[in-house]
Amino acid sequence: MEEARREAYTACISASKRVSARWWRVAAQLRTLGSTPDQWEAAAGEAHAAWAPFSTAVAGVTVVGPGPVAEAAEVLRRALYELDQAAVAWHEAARQAGHGNLADFDDRYMAAVAGKRVPGQAFQQAAREALNAER
């Protein structure tokens, strides 16, 4: 069981990092003068594609447990969902405006980035405890 948990936890961490990195790329492009809607669209497509593996990884954690790790994974999922929604809103507003220099959307996105840090750390701590890595 320990190996299955280790694999599930690692998959969840990796997938969460991919979601964050893909949206970070979109944000960087939105902030870059001269970037194009086609570039935003391509990067956003990659970010959207990263969500399903993350969601699957969270489901895997809920199966192998234990409960505290599963709960921490769900809190992380909700935090990344907030990041996803903030980035999607920014991307959509940029498409309508024709540029990504939209401070309110950038601020919301950065708040969501900050909001996922503690859940990410809490998930990793819960995983270490479940794997008795703190001995």
Image (cartoon, helix red, strand yellow):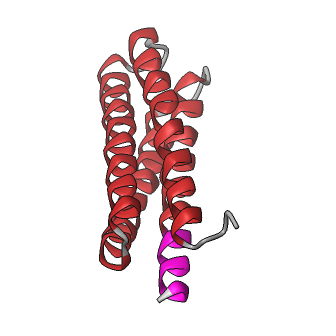
Q: Is residue 107 visible?
A: yes
Task: Residue 28: give x, y in percent of width and height.
Answer: 59, 32
Up-down relation of residue 100 to residue 62 (above or below): above
Horizontal and vertical percent for residue 129? 55, 63
Above or below residue 50? Residue 113 is: above
- Residue drawn 40% across and 20% down? 108
Which residue is painted at 38% across and 57% down in the image? 73
On screen, residue 91 versus residue 32, left or right, reads: left
Judged left or right of residue 118, residue 49 is left
- Foreground of the two, 38 or 27: 27
Location of residue 60 (image quadrant): bottom left
Quarter containing the C terminus: bottom right
Quadrant in which residue 6 is drawn = bottom right
Q: How many marks?
A: 0
* In magenta stretch: residue 7: yes
Pick out the residue farthest to the right: 135
Q: Is residue 78 magenta?
A: no
Residue 132 image point, x, y percent: 60, 71
Q: Residue at x 67, y 63 (%)?
A: 134
From which residue to which does the magenta span run? Answer: 2-11
